[in-house]
Image (spheres, helix red, strand yellow):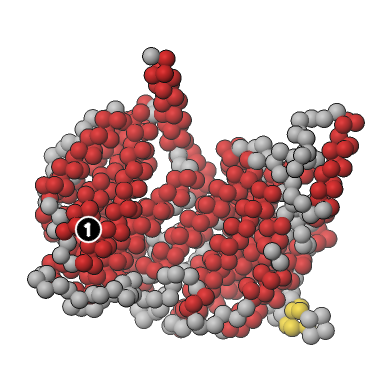
Amino acid sequence: MSDEHVYLSLAEGHDDSDARWAFGTGFEDPLHGVDTAVPEGVDAAELAAHCLALGDDALVAAQRLAEWCTRAPELEEEVALANIGLDLLGQARLLYSRAGQVDGTGRDEDAYAYLRDPADFRNVRLAELPCGDFAFSMARLLVTSSWRLAVFERLARTAQDPVLAAIAAKGVNELTYHRQYAAEWTVRLGDGTEESHRRMRAGLEQTAPYLEELFTAAATCGADPAGVRHEVTAALRQVTEAAGLPAVEAEPLPGHGREGDRTEHLAPLLAELQGIARAHPGAVW
Amino acid sequence: MTTPNATVPAEGAQKPLQEHFDATIARDQRIEPRDWMPEGYRRTLVRQIAQHAHSEIIGMQPEGEWITRAPSLRRKAILFAKVQDEAGHGLYLYSAAETLGVDRADLTQRLIEGRQKYSSIFNYPTLSFADVGVIGWFVDGAAICNQVPLCRSSYGPYARAMVRICKEESFHQRQGYELLMTMMRGTEAQREMVQDAVDRWWWPSLMMFGPPDGDSPNSAASMAWKIKRHSNDELRRRFVDMTVPQADKLGVTLPDPELRWNPERGRHDFGTPDWSELQRVISGDGPCNSERMERRRSAHEEGAWVREAATAHAAKQAARAEEGAVA
């Protein structure tokens, strides 16, 4: 490698063509080039609501995972948690873009992420709970990735909207890894030391009141809720047994995130996410 | 390569080993982990690679703070991925250091106890989102100037890690510059944010190349061993020459009244950084030294129970596998 050559190429004038920048930095619309017509017989309002709800779950979860950045217990976990956060952020962007195409408003991904208030979000409440310790984060990831995987596998097969089906199909590969990662840590922590066992058990118990909310028709966004419940319950049982942990059970919390019921934790999360964007109306980033 | 393995040879036996090592360096060939090497070479490499790895990991902090606040989803994804890359660079570099007989846990301990350093640039605060762009442009740009020659470093594992790292750093630099280009097309407030960030990061970035050549204690040996290929001042000049036209194109002013093109020398003349500031920051009195160390220390300590659990689980698994095999 010639040093001179490298320095010269770095010093080249930066022209305005996007070609020299990498993938993803040049186009505004993540669904660019995709046939976005809503198929006949699909209820556009319902489709938009599903995309928005699944997008909100992913955005809020990605924001929580980003909070781990520089705080993870080991470098490998730093990389893995960022990977998972990036996957979910990518899913959110695609889902918001689809929502904007079908709800008639033409809004872009940022309008949904940055310009809606907490009361307008429709994510399930488990997603917005604070990070907690590593055990709680793994417990939540185990539950949400098992659940989202079950939902996406069904939507990939059965969604009448081909765009939503394609987004779900892409997500299935990602979520399979997320579930695997969370399951491995659940087993390590459940089996590891007395302290890790205690923390892992407490983490799972904390998720328990939020489980029932995941298995309603509103939560599964067109995927069969009974099938999702069956699959998720079986997956959780398999992992907790392998980890030597009791099954996850608790009285469900009243209300529903999909209907706009929130915990006290979403507003501060959004204040942080939206602060700069809202402080600079008319700015371009 | 057929060099004998390095145990500790007797005084007389060392001479042919040293000659072989010197000849390998002279021929511009690579030293590999199993080759004999002088103790000073090994020590210098461990120090430099560890310091580089620590810089990647501490360097995640100033930008990582902005992932949750990034003002668009696209910028959030770019920044998240960049900070993740830095964790990956840390991993490659710690692995390269481990080929020299040290281990990552021990190096991390040395960082946390303040016995090993990291780049002083990360002790400056990030005050606005424009800092994310300027760090990409200046800090990653300066890192590339420092690191491109290291792709030809005489130590094989380090050189190979640097090839990959340089490619990613170059990508980060362009992303940073592209963010600034976009902001400069935005509102007046955004242009002011960019200029303010340029004003704050310019001098600290010039100091990333280290003290002037006359005051650089480790340079001579590193150059002779071909661990390092260019002097601090030479790299600093390259960086200035590379950056000035980019600043013009962007429409910002670099905060140095002495900066001008010198047609006779065919390069830019520029002012002298405040070296006493560099000394202060290196010795621990920079604006954010204690925050950076505290964050790294608390992440490490708070994660101890997780690492212990993973070790205990692995031991239990191994014991169970053994029991199974016996039964």
Q: Residue A268 appears at what percent x and percent y?
A: 30, 58
The residue at the far front in this view is: B2
Residue depicted at x 37% and y 52%: A84
Q: Which of A143 and B215 is in front in this view?
A: A143
State the quadrant of the C terminus of chain A: bottom left
Image vertical order of residue B74 relative to residue B40, above or below: below
> Relative to residue B56, is residue B273 drawn left or right?
right
Question: Circle 1 marks a residue in which chain?
Answer: A
Q: Nearer the viewer, residue B102 or A282?
A: B102
Image vertical order of residue A48 relative to residue A225, above or below: below
Q: Nearer the viewer, residue B79 or A114?
A: B79
Residue B318 visible (yes or no): yes
Quadrant of residue A159 in the image? bottom left
Quadrant of residue B170 in the image? bottom right
Residue depicted at x 49% and y 77%: A19
> Relative to residue A185, is residue A78 drawn left or right?
right
Q: Residue B27 appears at what percent x and percent y?
A: 82, 53
| Amino acid carrying mark 1 in the image | Ala
Q: Residues within 10 Å of mark 1 (few under 14, many from 20)?
A: many
Residue depicted at x 25% and y 34%: A238
Q: Residue A208 appears at what percent x and percent y?
A: 20, 40
The residue at the far left in this view is: A41
Q: Which residue has dot 1 on it? A: A156
Count up the numbered dots.
1
> Relative to residue B211, is residue A64 drawn left or right?
left
Q: Which of B112 and A23 is in front in this view?
A: A23
Quadrant of residue B242 in the image? bottom right
Q: Residue A34 appears at what percent x and percent y?
A: 29, 73
Q: Is mark 1 on a helix, strand or loop?
A: helix
Residue depicted at x 72% and y 54%: B153
